[in-house]
Image (spheres, grey):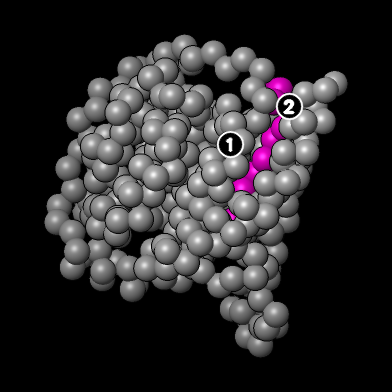
Amino acid sequence: MLDMSQSYHLCYIANALRTLVVYFACVIVLLGCATRSEVPVPAVAPPPPPIISPQLALVLGSGGARGYAHLGVLQALEEADIPIDLIVGSSAGSVVGVFYADKASSEEVNEIMLNTGFSDFVDLDAFFLPRGFIGGSRLQRFIAQNIDAKTFDELMIPFIATGTDLETGEAVELNSGPIPPAINASVALPGLLRPVELYGHELVDGGVAEPNPVRIAKRYDPQVTVAVDLAQDLSETMPRTARGVYSRAIDIIWAQLNERTLEGSDVVIRPTRGSNYGTFAISSQEALYRSGLEAGRASVPAIRALLEERRQR
């Protein structure tokens, strides 16, 4: 019998393959040949920078293009002068999270992220076709060209990306050494992006093991943990075919895992509930950003109250 992480891995692959034909054609049209990353990576992970008693840890969950909603949440917290002492990001959350950890300015991050398209992130690496259509070098270049920090210890806000060890199925913290390969590993969607070898691990998308890495944030004993969950509700339409039944079963597995990985959070912000944005809905980036801004602003009173309460203990 498959455990939850293995089932979620299958869910990722099944959902990716549904859209693969269309996007494979788009990639061929938009992109040329891939190039290998030239970022030097040590054989052993360097010691991570210290993270000492954060007041607020922000967990940015996985969700593909729905990650644009994270931008709005970050802006809302910044507008309310709510401090962020630690960011933990999985998959799409790692991309947005590392930009904010580098800039500490939603205006600067929005300027970068809201002016990007599919071709800014994706390359086609035909040589590695058996293990993934997309190589990852273009994503690494995009990260390197748009952040000031080169390594995790140079970031303005402590930040942890997460990947999934393809051999053990365990979540892996990525919080030291060069940044671009770590982000590449965190977003390596199985079946589409090639796995990333890093520090003795073969890594795929962090969302495979923990779509919302609250458990990792809690290791650092924050006073308040806020999670941004990018999940969507199950469809109200019941399936009428065998394929539809299988697809819904996978969606249920994913939903159950998603909820379990939110356990331990003090506040959960859900900007994409009730929406129908797919994993590759990059053209909806403005609407997703707006949904995050609205949900983030609505969460501010609860976060403020918790921070005040726990400061007085």
Q: Return the residue found at the far front.
A: 80
Magenta segment: does it hold 189?
no
Cα separation between marks 1 and 2 = 17 Å
Q: Nearer the viewer, mark 1 or mark 2?
A: 1
Which numbered tag is attached to residue 241? Answer: none
Q: Is residue 289 left or right of residue 83?
A: left
How dense is the environment of label 1, judged by Cα within 10 Å: few (below 14), some, or many (20 and up)?
Answer: few
The residue where tag 2 is placed is: 223
Q: Is residue 60 left or right of residue 123?
A: right
Query: What's the residue at 55%, 62% (across, down)?
Result: 291
Query: Foreground residue, 290 or 163?
Result: 290
The magenta segment? 220-230
Instruction: Residue at 44%, 51% (x, y): give it.
Output: 189
Q: Amino acid at mark 2?
A: Gln
Q: Residue under circle 1? A: 81
Residue at 75% in and 45% down: 302
The quadrant where residue 53 appears: top right
Viewer-closest of 301 and 221: 301
| Residue drawn at 82 percent across, 30 percent down | 309
The amino acid beneath tag 1 is Asp
